[in-house]
Amino acid sequence: MTTPLTPPPRKDPQKRTVSPTQPPGMRSRASLGLSAAAAEGRFALQACAECGKVQYPPRDACSGCLSTDLPWRDVSPSGTLLAETTIRTSVNLYFRERAPWRTGSVQLDAGPVILCHVHNDCDRNGRVVIWNRLDRSGQAVLLAVPEERTPVMEDDPQLRAMTSDPKHRRALITDARNPNAPALAAALKQAGASMIFVAEAESWRPYPGRKALEGIGGIEFLQMDVTDTSSVQRMAGEYGGKTDILINNARFIRPGGALARGDVAFARDEMEVNYLGLLRLAQAFGPAMCGRAADGVNSAVAWVNILSAWSLSNNAEFGCFSASNAAAYSLSQNLRAEFRPSGLRVMNVFTGPTEDSWFQPVPPPKVTPQAIARSVIGGLRDGLEDVWCGDVAKDMHERFLQNPKILEREMTGGGQG
Amino acid sequence: MSDALIQLAQALADGSVKVVDLTHTLDPDFPVIILPPEFGQCARFRMEEISAYDHRGPAWKWHNITMSEHTGTHFDAPNHWISGRDVPLNAVDEIPVDMFVGPVVVIDCSAEATEDEDFTMDPDFIRAWEDQHGRIPEDAWVLMRTDWSKRSGAPYLNMREDGAHSPGPSGDGIRFLVEERNIRGFGTETVGTDAGQGMHLSPPYPAHFTLHGAGKYGLQCLSNLDQLPPTGAVLMAAPLKIKNGTGSPLRVLAMVGKDAT
Amino acid sequence: MSRRQSYDGVVLVAPYSEPYQRYSIETAHWWIARALRGSLQSAGLKPGDLDGFSVASFTLFPDTAVGLTQHLGLCPRWLDHIPMGGASGVVALRRAARAVQAGDADIVACVAGDTNHIDSFRNMLSSFSRFAMDASYPYGYGGPNANFALLTDRYMQTYGATREDFGRICIAQRANALKNPGAVMKKPLSLDDYMAARPIADPIALFDCVMPCAGSEAFLVMTEDEAVKRNLPFARIAGAIERHNAFPDDPIQLRGGWVMDIDELYEQARTTPDTIDLLQTYDDYPVISMMQIEDLGFCAKGDAAAFVRAHDLTITGDFPHNTSGGQLSAGQAGAAGGFIGLVEAIRQVTGTAGPTQVADARRTMVSGFGMINYDRGVCSSAAIITSETA
């Protein structure tokens, strides 16, 4: 059984911080389909469209009938552990530093045999379930876990290396004024975060969420405004080295598109907060977090953006807000590229309309702060890159995957309505 | 050089006339006026480094700054308000420059503002001040001292669920100054020339409405008013020459005679 | 009934092994040149006498056999490059023999060689195969150690083999290696040493693993008439097989491609396992040698553990196996590991093995196994090499 993690001791100031190393991250293009599924926490394999044979490793042609039509499908993740080994030495630095490492061979019920990581709680030759997770190179790897959950299984070092679990980690939430902030802080506390920092802008004007935040207990307020470079730099200087998870919760939103607005004032604010705010945070906190991505139990592990699902396709009612979110989404992809060498993960939580005053005239379903908090914590625990929170976001995602152009027509008033 | 200017230069040099800075530092976290969120908002002061003797510019340091015309210690021109939209020479770039230097009187309401954060200055109060200090001269700046500039953080705007609470002139008070005394302009230590609850007066925002409708000017977010004499000082308040500008952050200075305070 | 034609009239001569080194500052080109030169010299030939050339190597990049012709000043009319690692010796032999038989070439040199720089093993792993890159290395990056650990684990579970059984193979090969001056391993190995060794990837420990090193091996293929004319001792090819990606549906590789073709091999050679005097298996890990003992017909499936308990595998034993010490004790010189058994077999049946010579060695089984493309070795090969008079 997994030994529960103990809170990490305070950092020894005489020890050099361990430099992040990476598991092998090179993959063929076909194999990236697995990473795409892992980014959302799904287990999918290629299944031949002609003969149905499930393939692994990923291929360009069916090993049963040579068809090149090999769509990815969610398949049964169940299987049996056939053989296992504990690797005690490796020429790869990442695994060398983390040895011993348990791997094995699993016969999937769906057909193929896979080599995979093996959770410590798996019984020898036992039944297992395969989780498709992103490792610190940002690529998919398969992990065998017991069929039934085991106590504190999330503390298994091999599993924890693939997730962004908040337990024993320190989290920074930006924008205390955002209605989501109290729910996020409460959820992090419940998930075992050791410290929660909440960035508060313009403390010279009161806001209702302050009392709720104070009520959670143990919250440390940082005076930081994502539109104020000097405040972001100052707080990064003070707290960048103890930020293990950064949740960018800052949002500026006003209704209207280009013509409805007639000026660029709100659009500029939206870009200042939603896009440039993210950029400022990344420039200030990114380097310190990347440098601490292998720093023990409370290593820096994840960067979370809460984005509108309209970053994928513009909603004309909130046309300028959507555009600023598209910019933020694009920047999040850039951050993935730049954080990749460290293993720091960028997780985007996409939401539809939220339950707050700006969406008051928008019909339900709407997303509550609690739902967003659940998505954030769940995504961190599963080590995801993309999380779709609420029915509207899930619906948008599905339509986007099916055909982005059709979605654009629907969103811009070209559908039946 | 005229004798008066030679004497002034000498007085400045020997300290018998001193210069008082009535300006707050432009700081990103300095409060600005808060309007209902569906309205346009006043941009905060922001500063981004262009270079700092580094790869972006090896021998020099400079910043880009952004803000509203009405951020920090700032000047209000008549075209700031709807009542002043058709006043001649109503934009900062059009105002005759001799308007930017002139006599100033300071009405001390600090005790009353300490007592009552919603204190409004009415004609009786002004007349009482005149009984003590003499009639307010024509074409003078009138500054309302409240010591509000000594507040910082949340108590400065003093926002509650029903809005800001800070002192200012009553409707009658500002009309008295404009109509009976024909002042040049009116200045405060608070974030606006009107009281925090000014929208509930009649007309709403009477200082803005009355001053600018009459082609008068406003100054707000002033500080150090406690260093000025009730009468006898000279105010220098020259806004940036912004084309069609409705106001401008500026450095507000006062020249004060040594024996005046 | 086999349609396989015989290799009559084609012979193997001039076996040559360049002594291995743990690390080398030289290149694969250097090592290949050394083995080629050694083989030609032992046959009294000049490079210009060659008209066929076959190469196996992992570390020639960016060159191939093509670049080597210009590099080494060769002008062959038949050229081959065998990217089959541990199976490359027998595969090279099969292709070269058919070329000579058909008259496409008269004298073919088959050479394998690799260098081993401080970082070459790591670099070779990183570019080995697409499936390994996608689906094997991300899982602990154990390289072949991890693959064979899984295979060994499953083999032990299925057939009841013990670590001591694997140890017997390793210990016997070390005894053989001590008689081979070219072997990298120079110290005796006891069962206690074997059992106490540092674990690498359970159940595999240090002495189950080959030592990557630099080295090269070569032999020549020519007509029997040519060998007789030049008065060269020669070996015959009684039969040879290869197979790739056999039994893809076996969940774990507990049998190799030999199983599909072994009957035809014996039929082609008109012989049976009991006539084989010595066996050269591909031995990067002892478990794979056990599988070959089974799949090549020396015992039933799953009985190899009992077989090695019942036999003496040393040069002077009743079942001489990997007489030069094999890769486990002589070292694994990259693709030369696919040649080491074959070159030793030619020496044995031509009576030129010197200190490792098995008395009356007339019939040798040589087998190859290679290329852990993902979870198993894809290539298998085997040949029966006999003496002139067998």
Image: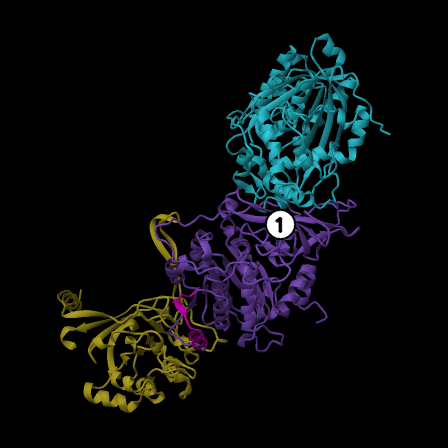
Q: Is residue A320 visible?
A: no
Q: Amino acid at mark 1?
A: Cys
Instruction: Give me the residue at 42% from left, 54% from top.
Output: A288
Q: Residue at the bottom extreme?
A: B124
Residue C124 placement (x, y as % from top left) = 58, 35
- Residue at image mark 1: A116
Q: Is residue C12 above or below residue C260?
A: above
Is disc 1 placed on a helix, strand or loop? Answer: strand
Instruction: Give me the residue at 65% from left, 41% from top.
Output: C161
Q: Is residue B187 above or below residue A400?
A: below
Q: Nearer the viewer, residue C299 or C296?
A: C299
The picture quadrant where one finds residue C328 is top right
| Residue C42 horizontal side relative to residue B29, left or right | right
| Residue B18 horizontal side relative to residue A261, left or right | left
Query: Looking at the rendering, in which quadrant would you find the C terminus of chain A?
Result: bottom right
Is residue A224 in the magenta section? Answer: yes
Q: Nearer the viewer, residue C120 or B141?
A: C120
Q: Residue at the front extreme?
A: C310
Residue C63 placement (x, y as % from top left) = 61, 27
Crowd tier of the residue under label 1, counting other residues whose Cα lies within 10 Å: few below 14, some 14–19, many 20 or above: many
Q: What's the colour of chain A in the image?
A: purple
Q: Residue at the right extreme?
A: C1
Residue B51 placement (x, y as % from top left) = 37, 52
* Residue bounds of the magenta highlight: A209-226
Chain in yellow, by letter, is: B
Residue C143 placement (x, y as % from top left) = 59, 40
Q: What's the colour of chain C in the image?
A: cyan
Task: Name the subunit of mark 1.
Answer: A
